[in-house]
Amino acid sequence: MADGKNVRAEIFETGNERVKAARIIIDAPAAKIFDLLANPSRHKEIDGSNTIQGKLSGPERLSLGAKFGMSMHLGIDYKIRNTVVEFEENKLIAWRHLGRWRWRYEIREIGSNQCEVTETFDGRKSISQAWLKLRKAYPWTQMVVAKTLVRLKEVMEAR
């Protein structure tokens, strides 16, 4: 079980400075992990950026093409609307918003009750490259994906 003190996600190089990723091993079935990721009402529980304030709109369970709105805070309060752009039940889910960068989660079963989860922030298609650079979003986001995965592990392995 994750104790939050010594648990770390593995940050790895993607070969592209606009793509930041990390992975972690979670002792939980893929379906349980995916259920949390596909429920935007629960995203605040695992948010390593501490920017999510809560869900504003959208379905309880995401699917391909689903739209969901979130209340956010990063210096100022704002709202963001996301669209699910990749979806494979219990294996893959990704969404993007108007800025076009993508948050992606891949789940790979490695045992009967164990999965490797990879989270990727992909800014390659962003229409706001200048803003991302000005805000130093890429180094910050690298740490955020790792923190999010640690929180996901803690939530999934809580007894």
Image: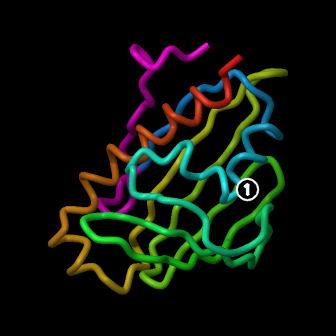
Q: In this view, does 54 lie above or below 129?
A: above
Q: In this view, does 42 lie to the left or right of 59?
A: left
Main secondary-structure element of the magenta-colored stretch: loop
Which of the 4 quarters of the picture holds residue 31? top right
Q: Is residue 101 left or right of residue 140?
A: right
Is 1 in front, or is 59?
59
Q: Is mark 1 on a helix, strand or loop?
A: loop
Q: In this view, does 95 lie above or below 33?
A: below
Q: Write the start and end of the magenta stretch as one range.
A: 1-20
Q: Mark 1 points at which residue?
A: 38
Q: Residue furthest left?
A: 134
Whether residue 51 appears in magenta in the rendering, the answer is no
Which of the 4 quarters of the picture holds residue 88? bottom right
> In the image, what residue occupies the spot 57% across and 26% down?
154
Q: In this view, does 138 lie to the left or right of 8?
A: left
Q: In this view, does 87 lie to the left or right of 19?
A: right
Badge 1 local density, few (<14 within 10 Å), some, or many (20+)? many
Is 89 in front, or is 78?
78
Instruction: Give coordinates of residue 140: x percent, y percent.
Output: 26, 52
- The quarter of the rendered structure image containing the C terminus is top right
Instruction: Give coordinates of residue 126: x percent, y percent.
Output: 39, 79
Q: Is residue 112 above or below residue 58?
A: above
Is 139 in front, or is 98?
98
Instruction: Give coordinates of residue 59: x percent, y percent.
Output: 78, 70
> In the image, what residue occupies the spot 60% across and 26% down?
25
> In the image, what residue occupies the spot 40% across and 14% down?
6
Which colour scheme appears in the figure? Answer: rainbow
